[in-house]
Each structure stands twice: as C-alpha cells, then as structure tokens.
Image: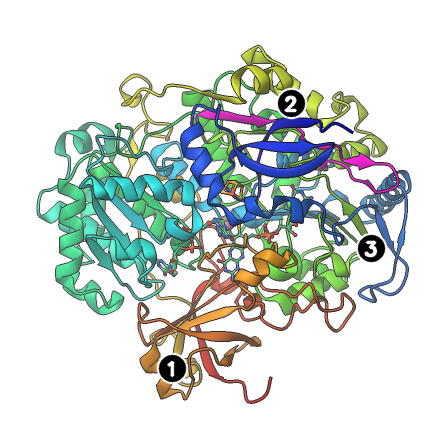
Amino acid sequence: MSEQVEVKKAICMWCHGHCSVAVEISNGRLVKITGNGDHPHGKALTSLVKACPRARAAAEWFYHPDRLSYPLKRVGERGEGKWESISWEQALDEIAEKLKTIREKYGAEAIATSSGTARTADEYKARFFSLLGSPNSIGQGQICYGPDNLIASAIIGWPADHMHLRPETKCILLIGTNPHASTRHAWFPIRDAKKAGVKLIVIDPRRTKTAEKADVWLQLRPGTDTALLTSMINIIITEGLYDKDFVEKWCYGFDELAGRANEYPPEKVAEITWVPAERIKEAARMYATNRPATSVSMMGLEHLANGMEALCARFILPAITGNIDVRGGNMLRPSHPQIVPESEIELNDRVSPDQKTKTLGGDRFRLLSWPGYDLIQENQKRVWGTPISRLHNCFAHAPTVFRAMFTDKPYSVRALITMSSNPMVTMPNTKLVYKALKSLDLYVVMDYWMTPSADLSDYVLPAASWLERPTVYTFGDTIGFIGAGEAALPSVVEGKYDRKTDYEFWRGLGIRLGQEEYWPWKNLEEGYDYRLKPLGYTLKEFVSKRNGYDATRSEPKKYEKIGFATPTGKVELYSTILERLGYDPLPRYEEPPESPISTPELAKEYPLILITGGRFQPYFHSEQRQIDSLRKQRPNPVIQINPEKASELGIRNGDWVWIETPRGRVRQKCEYFKGIDPRVVHAQHGWWLPELPGEEPWLHGVWESNINVLTDDEPDHCNKIGGLWPLRALLCKVYKVKQC
Ligand SMILES: Nc1nc2c(c(=O)[nH]1)N[C@H]1C(S)=C(S)[C@@H](COP(=O)(O)OP(=O)(O)OC[C@H]3O[C@@H](n4cnc5c(=O)[nH]c(N)nc54)[C@H](O)[C@@H]3O)O[C@H]1N2
Ligand SMILES: Nc1nc2c(c(=O)[nH]1)N[C@H]1C(S)=C(S)[C@@H](COP(=O)(O)OP(=O)(O)OC[C@H]3O[C@@H](n4cnc5c(=O)[nH]c(N)nc54)[C@H](O)[C@@H]3O)O[C@H]1N2
Ligand code: SF4
Ligand SMILES: [Mo]
C-alpha cells in the first residue's frame, strides 16, 4: 500500500500555549505533531513545539490503551470500580431523565457543574446551564485568571495582564509567576529581552529559573504580596516617581490611595514580608523609572487568601506609572470584533434575577459571582461593546457548593457534571470533596481517562480530544485575536472507539431537556461556522486560508477616545465597584489564615510555611502520569526543602517524607533546594497514580501524594471578596517516612 500522508492544522490544548500545530497523519495514523510553520508566528511555534515534551509524546498519548473509548455506566456501588459499556443514546437518555427528576424535586439549582482551566468549548456548557436555570457552576477559573480578569475589569475596565513585550519595553515585573516552567511561550521573549538589556524584577518566594535571571529578586514570605506591592506604591508616590499627568487626568481616588499606601512604609513591610526595605525601594524605583514597563501576575497571587487585595495593588502599579494601554506596557486588548463573542453563546441574559440570587456563595463572595459580574459587564458593554465572558469569571463558590452536597444547606445540590476537570486532585481539601461526591444522586464525568474523580461517578463519558475536534478559542473574549484549528482525526472508529465532543454532550442533553430551539448547530464545527460568520469564513476556510489566526491591531491609549470601562470612566485606584459590593475599595494586607503570626499556636505544631503547585514539566496539572515516556522524566512527586532545614530534620536528599497539615498527610520525595527559605517548603500538586487500582480504597492512588488532601477550603479562610481558597501560604510539618 502506498503511504498516504496528510497534514492537518489543529490547536493543541495540552497547555495554555494553545500552539497552532501541524498534525502528521500517515495511512490514517497520527505520526507526530510539529509547530505550524505557515502560521504568522510559525518560527516561534516551531521551536516551542519542538522542545515540548507533551507534543513529543503525542502518538503515545493518542493511542494509549487506557484512553476512554465508550460511555461507561456504574454497575456496582459507587467507587467499587464496576462498569458496563453502554451506547451514547442510552447514556444521554438516562442522564437526562435523572436530571429531570432532580430538577422537579429540588429545582434546577440542585444541578451543578465543575470545569477546569479553559481547555474546551466551555461557552456551550454555560449556554446549557443558562437555559437549565442553574447558577451553580464552579471551576478552576475562580482561582485561575478569573480573579485577575475581575480585578483588572473593576479597576481598569478590562483585563490587562497579557504580557505585552515589545521592543519599547524597558522593564518586566513578574509577580508570582514562573514562565520558565509554566508558560514557555512567554518565557522565550522574556529571556531574549533580558539579553537585550531589559530590566527584570521577580517577586517569588523561590529562586526559580526565572528568578535566577532577575536584576532584582524579591524573596518574600508567602502570602504577603499585598503588603509588598502596596509598599512599592508608597515609595513611588512619596518619591514622586508616578506619572502625574496620567494620574491627574485618568485616575480616580489618588489621595485615598496615597493615604492607604502611607500605612505601608518599607521598613514596616520588611518585617512583614522578610524582604529588606532597600530591596523593596530598589524594585519600586526600577519599575517606575524604566518605562514602558510591562507586568504580569499569576498564581502566586491568585492562590492566596489575600489574593484579590494583592491584585488590586498589582494593577494600581501600572496605572500610577502610566503603563496602562501603552505599547510595551500593559495594553488593553478588546475582544476581536468579527467573531460572535463567547458571552453571546452563553445566553447570560437568560439567567433570571431569582436564579442569580440562588448562586451558592454568591451572596458572600460577591465579586466572583453575579453581583460583581453584572456591575462589570454593564460598564464593559457601554465602552467596549462586549463584556468578558461569564464562564471563567462568574461562579458559584466551589467549597460552598461541595458543602451543600452533603449538608443540604442552604439547599440541596444533588447532581454534578464534571467536564475537563479532576476535582478529586485539583480542588482543595480532597477529603471534603470526596465526601461531597459520594453523597450525590448523580455524578457524571466527561474526560479522556479514568481519573480519581471518574472513579466516583455514575457515568463516565469518553471525550473527543482536541485532536479529534475542531477548536476556536478566544479565551473568554479577553484576547484580541482568534485562534482556530481543524479536527485532525476522527472521533469515531467502528469497533475501536466512539467519542463525542463536549459540545455534542451538552447539545444532546439540551435537546432532551427541552432546549432544542437553542441548539441549531448539529456539531461543533457548525457552531464555530456560526461564530466565525462575521469574519467571512467557515471554520475550514479560516484554517486553510488564514492558518486559523486573525488579530486586531490594538491602538494604544484608546481611553483618550472612549474612556475606561469603569463607573467613573477613569482608572479606579479607589474602586467604586468594590465599594458598592461592600468591600474595602483600596488594597489592604491581611495575614494568611494560617501563619506563624495569625495562628501562633498552630505554628508550634506545624512550623513550616507550605506553598504548593509550582509548575513543572512535563506534566499539565493532574494529567499525563500514565504516559510512560513522560513518567520516566518525572516518576515521583517532589517537595523542595532548604538543605539546612532538611538536615536539621534528619532528611536526606531523595528521602520520602510525610507532609502533614491539620487536614491530613501525604508523602513526596525530598529535593534539596537552596533557593527556598529554610522556613518555607514547596510541594508539587496534581499527583495521583494511574497504575494503582481504580476502586476504593485506592481510587488510583489519590490519597498517596496528592497535596490537595492537605490544602484548606474553609469558607471563612477564603478571600473575602472573591472566595479564593488558599493553595499557597499554609502551615505544615515535614518528617521522614520510616518505611515505604
Ligand atoms: N494545590 C494546588 N492545587 C491546584 C493548583 C495549585 O497550584 N496548587 N493549581 C490550580 C489551577 S491554577 C488549576 S487551573 C487547576 C487545574 O485543575 P483541572 O483543570 O481540574 O486540572 P487537570 O489535571 O488539567 O484536569 C483536567 C481533566 O480534564 C481532562 N480533559 C482535558 N481536556 C479536556 C477536554 O477538552 N474535554 C474533556 N471532557 N476533558 C478534558 C483531563 O484528562 C483531566 O483529567 O488546578 C488547581 N489546583
Ligand atoms: N508544565 C505546566 N505548565 C503549566 C501548568 C501545569 O500544570 N504544568 N498549568 C498552567 C496553569 S492552569 C496555570 S494557572 C499557570 C500558572 O503559571 P504560574 O503562575 O507562572 O506558575 P506557578 O508555578 O503556579 O506559580 C508561580 C510562582 O508562584 C510562586 N509563589 C508561591 N507562593 C507565592 C506567594 O505567596 N507570592 C508570590 N509572589 N509568589 C508565590 C511559586 O514559587 C511559583 O514559582 O501555569 C500553566 N502552565
Ligand atoms: S503542550 Fe506543547 S505543543 Fe501543546 S500547547 Fe503546550 S507548549 Fe504548545
Ligand atoms: Mo490554572
């Protein structure tokens, strides 16, 4: 047989790089994936994909025998690991019937859903839930990009966080982000800019590969960013280094800000943060005097109990230094005007005021739910025409929803549909999540693999991966471009597998639940054709003619024409949105809920500060542990401990150690790491062991090394404004495992 080679252009969704890739297929079989060299960013893509461990393992991933192929229905007890294979028709019919029963008995709000980190067409999930009438959507967006989008939207009127490195850029400020490990596509330009003499400031408790390159590295005590950043504001104001013209014309509440910043003199803040006052001053001066300066903050802030306040300070910094919406600073990029926005697909106006008020946790954590989203979208619609999308920016509070599942308070939640997320590994306080999932009437998981979450479900549905479905992404309408790719391989092969797109699942359920008229697009491709219509292409045309890429050219200083999308039309250093929601309108530092200072008694037993989840290759969160070639690179979970502290505790490099918090203990392997303070340890997240049995008590090793067994989700400890749960800055103790 002569060889038939085909190349398809898809979007890789294995991480947030969203690379446009060329998928090489020979005689119908995936051979390899490479960067799409024809793309406008072809050169960068080619080297990025070439160096990417997940891309190299593509065929191994795709043809892995453990990938889910047919819908499964639980036949034994929940968690017993007994399944039968059923058809899609049967699965959808039965799930729809069960949902109807729950809706009749308890109301639509008794049906919840959990999502992951923007890996699939979540806008259609939002559509389903808008029509169903349940506001109880939880997801990783509430501690990942959502808070950042919301605070930026409240203060500046639009998300401004996307790194905007340009030849003009003179300084880069990285706060709680380690692009060297987490966002490689952003790392290479930073490295090159650094070589060209651009200043680099890194705020991170660990000396990461990124921090190693910094001109100034601020090694702060975890959880103290708000104090540190507000002190930088203090220095910039008192030394007159701010942009007076911009502040005068375009900022609201400068005097109030100056008053608050006054409470954070560097000498006092040095005590709080462990960063010497001179260093804080050096960083503040470097940032303020090297303009334009771009700044990025990520999970180092969003995973803190005091995270929203830190984000306020973080966005005030570029505002007072005139770095907002300038080339090489932090540009505001409105959503692409020639695509039907996600927010429209979501049908948000179908959610009734009554349903909105039922959002669990929405009355308490108001910025991250409808009260905040409604205020924000009102301003954004006025100025930008389109708001940021809902699904990753407006939520029910996950810990509150999990509690409602087993307490029936404030009302019952009886069903959960998990798509593209693995809550048993990635949500905090696994024991509580376990208890919640076990108490449901219906739990449905749609995934590529059996996971510890799927182990506890009633139905497991095999999802078509990004290789088997088309993709259009606009990342919550917060980026100024459209990325698209085609399906590279079929999602159904008779006798081998029958997978569906996540879209088809929602549509199938929607039709069965009386939503037929809202699902005119028979499949995802038709859905995308509809979204791309204003651009004048079908999905296929857009990919073949334009490489699936179109970007708007965003002019700087758009505010001079349209103002800022805030209630005052200015950058709100004093946030009237936060004020209206009943919160402090200015940044305010609070000690972490667990710390040597806030809980000294607890610190006696758990003397070390625990940070979790620093990214590492080759994995993405809880994924890829079953891919042998990747697992060989990182066979075991790792906790980083300063060698001085480790030897004090009798722990050698490579020893297995127990990590314990008041919520339990798990074990990881000690790695000596000099780049961490002896009072702090850092443990990896995402660990479960696919090689262990799926039934209880193993649940694929979810209790062994999964750091979220130890993390805290107590609503009283979550961020007051947005409910963020503290995944970083906790207390723990560490001791050697006697026998493995
Ligand atoms: N302790 C601690 N916990 C953390 C973090 C931390 O730093 N520390 N980080 C947090 C952050 S920022 C995030 S974003 C979350 C990530 O949390 P999750 O999004 O839950 O993480 P993943 O492990 O990527 O899980 C995604 C699951 O969905 C499946 N999947 C992937 N793509 C698709 C798809 O397109 N369709 C379907 N149906 N399934 C798909 C994968 O196989 C996998 O099982 O973890 C959070 N948890
Ligand atoms: N390989 C790989 N890449 C990924 C992911 C993955 O799982 N694997 N996940 C993706 C996702 S969903 C996300 S959200 C991004 C996250 O991307 P990043 O935020 O860049 O990465 P992290 O390593 O989670 O966190 C950044 C840094 O925060 C530091 N940190 C911890 N506590 C604090 C603190 O209190 N203050 C400050 N300032 N810093 C602190 C950590 O030491 C860490 O170096 O990565 C994405 N990229
Ligand atoms: S996994 Fe690799 S190829 Fe895929 S988007 Fe991320 S960096 Fe790009
Ligand atoms: Mo994330």
Q: Label 2: which residue?
A: 528
Whether residue 240 is visible here, answered yes or no, is yes
Q: Label 3: which residue?
A: 458
Q: Confirm or reject: label 2 Cβ below 8 Å from ligand 1.
A: no
| Mark 2 vs 3, N-terminal side | 3
720 vs 407, left or right, is left
Q: Report x, y in % for residue 344.
A: 60, 24
Amino acid type indicated by mark 3: Asp
Q: Report x, y in % for residue 245.
A: 14, 29
Q: Confirm or reject: label 1 Cβ below 8 Å from ligand 2.
A: no
Tell me the CA gap for discs 2 and 1: 54 Å
Amino acid type indicated by mark 2: Tyr
497 inside magenta stretch? yes
Whether residue 399 is visible here, answered yes or no, is no
Q: Report x, y in % for residue 644.
A: 31, 81
Which residue corresponds to the image point at 18% horizontal and 57% vertical from the top-left?
280
Amino acid type indicated by mark 1: Ala
Residue 423 figure quarter: bottom right
Disc 2 secondary structure class? helix
Disc 3 secondary structure class? loop
The region drawn magenta spans 480-501
Crowding at dot 1, Cα within 10 Å, few <14 / some 14-19 / many 20+, comes out as: many
The nearer-to-camera label among 2 and 3 is: 2
| Mark 2 vs 1, N-terminal side | 2
Instruction: Please tell me whether residue 331 is drawn above or below residue 152 in the rendered image.
Output: above
Quick check: marks 2 and 3 in contact, CB under 8 Å? no
Which one is in front, 583 or 498?
498
Tell me the CA gap for discs 1 and 3: 44 Å
Instruction: Please tell me whether residue 652 is drawn above or below residue 556 in the rendered image.
Output: below
Q: Residue furthest top?
A: 536
